[in-house]
Amino acid sequence: PAATAEPAERSAGGMQQPHLNQVAPEPGEELAEFQVVMDLLESPDFQGAPATYKGQVRRLEMIEEKGLPPLQVISARKLAELGRIPRSTEGHAVKALDEVKKYGSDKTVNGRSRVILVFFSHRWKRPNWCRPDSCEHEGQDLDWGSDERKKAGEDGWVCGDPDDSAHTKAKALIEWAKYCQFASEVM
Protein backbone atom coordinates (compact mmCIF):
# COMPACT_ATOMS: atom_id res chain seq x y z
CA PRO A 1 0.00 0.00 0.00
CA ALA A 2 1.08 3.56 -0.62
CA ALA A 3 2.31 5.68 2.28
CA THR A 4 -0.13 8.33 3.47
CA ALA A 5 0.52 11.51 5.37
CA GLU A 6 -0.79 11.64 8.93
CA PRO A 7 -0.96 14.76 11.07
CA ALA A 8 1.89 15.02 13.53
CA GLU A 9 1.19 14.51 17.22
CA ARG A 10 2.46 17.18 19.55
CA SER A 11 4.54 16.37 22.59
CA ALA A 12 4.47 18.20 25.89
CA GLY A 13 7.08 20.63 24.64
CA GLY A 14 5.15 21.32 21.47
CA MET A 15 7.59 19.64 19.08
CA GLN A 16 6.13 17.40 16.43
CA GLN A 17 6.17 13.69 17.16
CA PRO A 18 6.77 11.90 13.85
CA HIS A 19 4.70 8.99 12.64
CA LEU A 20 5.89 6.32 10.24
CA ASN A 21 4.15 7.86 7.23
CA GLN A 22 4.42 11.52 8.19
CA VAL A 23 5.36 14.15 5.66
CA ALA A 24 8.32 16.18 6.91
CA PRO A 25 7.54 19.74 8.08
CA GLU A 26 8.41 22.63 5.82
CA PRO A 27 11.95 24.00 6.30
CA GLY A 28 11.99 26.48 9.17
CA GLU A 29 8.60 25.41 10.57
CA GLU A 30 10.05 23.55 13.57
CA LEU A 31 12.66 26.27 14.11
CA ALA A 32 9.95 28.94 14.31
CA GLU A 33 7.96 26.88 16.83
CA PHE A 34 11.13 26.25 18.83
CA GLN A 35 11.74 30.01 18.99
CA VAL A 36 8.22 30.60 20.35
CA VAL A 37 8.91 28.01 23.06
CA MET A 38 12.27 29.59 23.94
CA ASP A 39 10.79 33.09 24.05
CA LEU A 40 8.05 31.89 26.39
CA LEU A 41 10.43 30.03 28.71
CA GLU A 42 12.73 33.07 28.91
CA SER A 43 9.91 35.58 29.48
CA PRO A 44 9.67 37.37 32.84
CA ASP A 45 5.97 36.42 33.06
CA PHE A 46 6.68 32.70 32.72
CA GLN A 47 9.73 32.71 34.99
CA GLY A 48 8.05 35.00 37.50
CA ALA A 49 4.89 32.94 37.96
CA PRO A 50 4.93 31.82 41.61
CA ALA A 51 5.49 28.20 42.66
CA THR A 52 1.86 27.83 43.65
CA TYR A 53 -1.32 26.41 42.20
CA LYS A 54 -2.13 29.79 40.61
CA GLY A 55 1.39 30.04 39.16
CA GLN A 56 1.22 26.54 37.72
CA VAL A 57 -2.14 27.29 36.11
CA ARG A 58 -0.79 30.58 34.72
CA ARG A 59 2.24 28.91 33.11
CA LEU A 60 0.08 26.24 31.48
CA GLU A 61 -2.31 28.92 30.18
CA MET A 62 0.61 30.90 28.72
CA ILE A 63 1.61 27.87 26.64
CA GLU A 64 -1.77 27.81 24.92
CA GLU A 65 -1.96 31.62 24.65
CA LYS A 66 1.22 31.49 22.54
CA GLY A 67 -0.51 29.15 20.11
CA LEU A 68 1.49 26.14 21.25
CA PRO A 69 -0.10 22.74 21.78
CA PRO A 70 -1.21 22.19 25.37
CA LEU A 71 1.10 20.29 27.70
CA GLN A 72 -0.04 16.66 27.82
CA VAL A 73 0.62 14.31 30.75
CA ILE A 74 0.13 10.70 31.75
CA SER A 75 -0.73 10.33 35.40
CA ALA A 76 1.19 8.02 37.71
CA ARG A 77 -2.14 6.30 38.37
CA LYS A 78 -2.64 5.57 34.65
CA LEU A 79 0.96 4.39 34.29
CA ALA A 80 0.46 1.96 37.20
CA GLU A 81 -2.83 0.76 35.70
CA LEU A 82 -1.20 0.06 32.33
CA GLY A 83 2.07 -1.30 33.75
CA ARG A 84 3.89 0.08 30.71
CA ILE A 85 4.71 3.33 28.94
CA PRO A 86 1.94 3.94 26.41
CA ARG A 87 2.45 5.28 22.92
CA SER A 88 1.21 8.83 22.30
CA THR A 89 -1.40 7.53 19.85
CA GLU A 90 -3.15 5.40 22.50
CA GLY A 91 -5.06 8.33 23.97
CA HIS A 92 -3.92 8.04 27.60
CA ALA A 93 -2.42 11.52 27.75
CA VAL A 94 -4.59 14.32 29.12
CA LYS A 95 -4.18 18.09 29.22
CA ALA A 96 -2.00 19.07 32.16
CA LEU A 97 -4.06 22.23 32.73
CA ASP A 98 -7.23 20.15 33.10
CA GLU A 99 -5.55 17.86 35.63
CA VAL A 100 -4.15 20.75 37.65
CA LYS A 101 -7.57 22.43 37.77
CA LYS A 102 -9.30 19.14 38.57
CA TYR A 103 -7.20 18.53 41.71
CA GLY A 104 -6.80 22.17 42.74
CA SER A 105 -4.54 23.56 45.42
CA ASP A 106 -3.37 22.19 48.73
CA LYS A 107 -4.97 24.58 51.20
CA THR A 108 -2.60 23.52 53.99
CA VAL A 109 0.71 24.29 52.29
CA ASN A 110 0.78 27.88 51.00
CA GLY A 111 -1.57 27.20 48.10
CA ARG A 112 0.71 24.83 46.20
CA SER A 113 -0.78 22.69 43.46
CA ARG A 114 -1.85 19.18 44.42
CA VAL A 115 -0.51 18.05 41.01
CA ILE A 116 3.24 17.71 40.61
CA LEU A 117 4.35 17.84 37.00
CA VAL A 118 7.60 16.00 36.33
CA PHE A 119 9.32 15.53 32.98
CA PHE A 120 11.34 12.36 32.43
CA SER A 121 13.65 12.17 29.46
CA HIS A 122 14.93 8.86 28.23
CA ARG A 123 16.30 6.93 25.29
CA TRP A 124 14.01 4.39 23.71
CA LYS A 125 15.13 0.82 24.46
CA ARG A 126 13.79 -0.43 21.13
CA PRO A 127 14.01 2.68 18.97
CA ASN A 128 12.99 1.48 15.58
CA TRP A 129 12.36 -1.86 14.03
CA CYS A 130 11.49 -5.34 15.04
CA ARG A 131 9.68 -8.11 13.27
CA PRO A 132 6.36 -8.87 14.95
CA ASP A 133 7.69 -12.31 15.95
CA SER A 134 10.97 -11.09 17.56
CA CYS A 135 10.64 -7.65 19.12
CA GLU A 136 13.84 -7.81 21.16
CA HIS A 137 15.83 -7.23 17.94
CA GLU A 138 16.46 -3.51 17.55
CA GLY A 139 17.16 -3.66 13.82
CA GLN A 140 18.22 -0.71 11.73
CA ASP A 141 17.98 2.88 12.83
CA LEU A 142 16.05 4.48 9.97
CA ASP A 143 15.26 8.19 9.74
CA TRP A 144 11.63 9.26 10.23
CA GLY A 145 9.95 9.89 6.88
CA SER A 146 12.69 8.24 4.82
CA ASP A 147 11.70 6.05 1.87
CA GLU A 148 13.53 3.13 3.50
CA ARG A 149 11.50 3.53 6.70
CA LYS A 150 8.22 3.76 4.76
CA LYS A 151 9.13 0.59 2.88
CA ALA A 152 9.92 -1.20 6.17
CA GLY A 153 6.44 -0.26 7.45
CA GLU A 154 4.83 -1.58 4.29
CA ASP A 155 6.79 -4.83 4.73
CA GLY A 156 5.27 -5.47 8.17
CA TRP A 157 7.87 -4.05 10.52
CA VAL A 158 6.48 -2.37 13.64
CA CYS A 159 7.53 0.86 15.33
CA GLY A 160 9.80 0.82 18.34
CA ASP A 161 8.95 0.96 22.02
CA PRO A 162 10.29 3.29 24.72
CA ASP A 163 10.78 0.38 27.13
CA ASP A 164 12.09 -3.17 27.11
CA SER A 165 9.78 -6.19 27.04
CA ALA A 166 9.88 -6.44 30.87
CA HIS A 167 8.70 -2.78 31.14
CA THR A 168 11.68 -1.91 33.35
CA LYS A 169 11.32 1.86 32.88
CA ALA A 170 7.58 1.85 33.56
CA LYS A 171 8.11 -0.18 36.74
CA ALA A 172 10.80 2.24 37.93
CA LEU A 173 8.53 5.25 37.27
CA ILE A 174 5.65 3.57 39.11
CA GLU A 175 7.88 2.90 42.15
CA TRP A 176 9.19 6.47 42.05
CA ALA A 177 5.60 7.80 42.03
CA LYS A 178 4.75 5.57 45.02
CA TYR A 179 7.73 6.99 46.88
CA CYS A 180 6.69 10.58 46.07
CA GLN A 181 3.15 9.85 47.29
CA PHE A 182 4.54 8.38 50.53
CA ALA A 183 6.96 11.26 51.03
CA SER A 184 4.22 13.87 50.54
CA GLU A 185 2.00 12.10 53.09
CA VAL A 186 4.66 12.01 55.82
CA MET A 187 5.94 15.56 55.34
Image (tube, rainbow, N blue to C red):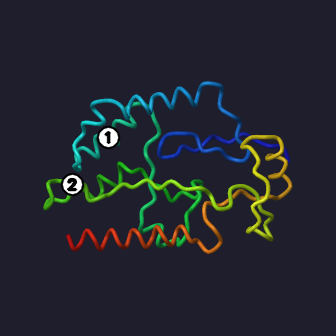
From the viewer's perspective, is residue 20 above or below residue 79? above
Crowdedness of circle 1 by 10 Å Cα count: few (<14), some, many (20+)? many
Nearest the viewer among 8 and 41 is 41
Residue at image position (19%, 59%) is 106
Q: Earlier in the sequence, mark 2 or mark 1?
A: 1
* Circle 1: residue type: Arg
Residue 166: x percent and y percent? 62, 75
Q: Mark 2 and mark 1 in contact? Answer it, CB < 8 Å.
A: no
Q: Which of 142 and 93 is in front in this view?
A: 142
Instruction: Write the residue at 28% across / 30% down.
Output: 44
Give coordinates of residue 50: x percent, y percent: 22, 43
In this rendering, the answer to whether 109 lies above or below 144 is below
The x, y position of residue 120, in whole percent, is 47, 56
Residue 59 badge: 1
Q: Is 109 situated left or right of 179 in this image?
A: left
| Residue holding disc 2 | 112
**Which amino acid type is marked by label 2?**
Arg
